[in-house]
Image: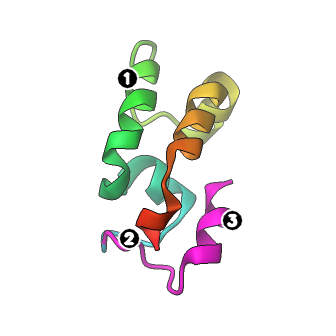
Amino acid sequence: MVRCLVSVFAESPECICKHGDQTTDHLIYDCEILDKEREKPIAYTSREEDWPVRKCELVNKYLKQITTFANSIDFEKLK
């Protein structure tokens, strides 16, 4: 989902945070540039289960929250 959009902008697979390749997993779970955007899905999902939540659970149980997270990403920051 996110990987397709990011790869349009990226000249290299490495994320500009320098802590991994710019993959869906990296953006959802690890990229420090997106820490602020990640706070809401973490807070919401942590009411029911521990973060990190598996991607299949994000889609099956928390689609609204992960969609809001994806839509909140400023892709200009990831160029």
Where residue 6 appears, as percent x and y from the top left, is 59, 67
**Residue 62 colored magenta?**
no
Viewer-nearest residue: 29 or 70: 70
Residue under numbered circle 2: 20
Q: Residues within 10 Å of mark 3 (few under 14, many from 20)?
A: few
Viewer-nearest residue: 9 or 43: 9
Residue under numbered circle 1: 43
Where residue 69 appears, as percent x and y from the top left, is 52, 39
In this rendering, would 57 be left or right of 21?
right
What's the distance in space between the residues labelled 1 and 2, CA to CA?
Answer: 24 Å
Q: Which span is picked out in magenta?
A: 1-17
Disc assigned to residue 74: none
Among the two numbered marks 3 and 2 on one chain, the one whose residue lies closer to the N terminus: 3
Q: Is residue 22 above or below residue 68?
A: below
Disc assigned to residue 4: 3
- Residue type of the residue flagged with mark 3: Cys
Determine the residue positioned at 69% across, 27% down. 60
Q: Are marks 3 and 2 in contact (CB under 8 Å)?
A: no
